Amino acid sequence: MSEDITKGASAPVEPTFDNFGQNCVEGGEISEFSAVPGTTNSQGGIQGDLKNQDVSNDQIQGELKNQVASNHRIPQKKQKKKKGVHKKKLSRKLERYESQALATPSSVWRDDSGGNAWVGERGYRVKPLVVIDLNGVLVERMERGDATGENDCDGFGGGRGYKVMLTKGELEEIMKDYAVAVWSSGDKKSVKKILAGVYGGLVERFVFVWGGERCLGDREVGRGHRNTKRKPLRRVHGEFAGIWDERNCLLVDDSEEKVVEGDRRIVVGADDVNRLKEVIGEEFSKERA
């Protein structure tokens, strides 16, 4: 009897490993993998159990590595900030201005028709840049409630009112022949808030709006020890190298204390603001005369 049973029975199927830690194929059927009785599912117990099933050592090590890698993701190291990132951003900024110059005229660029356009180092025409102070030129700070004129604004920037010295229409006239930027010694956020309240969408046409964070103290420009914030135009020249420099860049401020000696500038009073475009034209014409 025993011999007949042996003849009709198929040979036992050796267990093979599949999907480590989850399934083990035995005789074509998938069953849960269990550790050898008396052991735990530690790497040592698993290795011993796999060896009992005649699984090669290379396969054991490979499956263990795969399991560890899937369960424990190695955190990526934080990338250090590469040097030269600021230069790349500046380069992209200049490329953007160049693309504007080659396309259609804007508040920054002029076409080849001439006018007040200057030829820049990069071979195209640009409008001369006029960097204007906020308080004392564009607006005049007043106590809250005192701004009662037709073009005055109340409640901008720290709750104070502002008397508009240069109207929106006058600013648009200046922008026809000049690129315009704003540089104030005040807080940049407050400056933008005031500009938006006074000039609305015209703010989008400013080349830039800078606040006191871009100014330099007296010690940094070699002028005494007072805490006056000054506006060196070399910072503008450096930011827009090859586009605007001492030949085609002008600072307009109401205070001699805030300008840097040697910079091209106009220190204006209230009467000058009323004819600001004319005053700017006179200054730029000096070098071309």
Image (tube, rainbow, N blue to C red):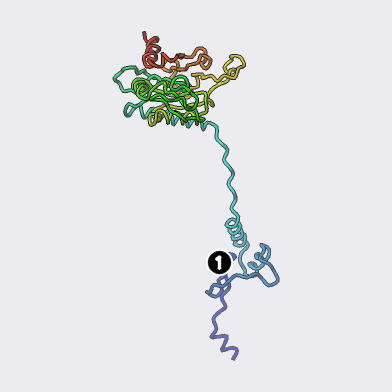
Of residue 72 and residue 101, the one placed in the foreground of this image is 101
- Picture layout, residue 73 above or below residue 205: below
Of residue 58 and residue 229, the one placed in the foreground of this image is 229
Residue 176 placement, left or right of 161: left
Location of residue 201 in the rendering, given as x and y in whole percent from the top left corner = 38, 31
Q: Residues within 10 Å of mark 1 (few under 14, many from 20)?
A: some
The residue identified by callout 1 is: 18
For the point 68% across and 63% down, the residue is: 44
- Picture layout, residue 121 above or below residue 52: above
Of residue 131 and residue 198, the one placed in the foreground of this image is 198
Location of residue 247 in the rendering, given as x and y in whole percent from the top left corner = 42, 15
For the point 47% across and 32% down, the residue is: 89
For the point 52% across and 17% down, the residue is: 258
Location of residue 125 in the rendering, given as x and y in whole percent from the top left corner = 35, 21
* Quadrant housing the N terminus: bottom right
Spot the residue most to the right: 38
Location of residue 46 in the rendering, given as x and y in whole percent from the top left corner = 65, 65
Of residue 144 and residue 50, the one placed in the foreground of this image is 144
Spot the residue most to the left: 113
Residue type for callout 1? Asp
* Quadrant housing the C terminus: top left
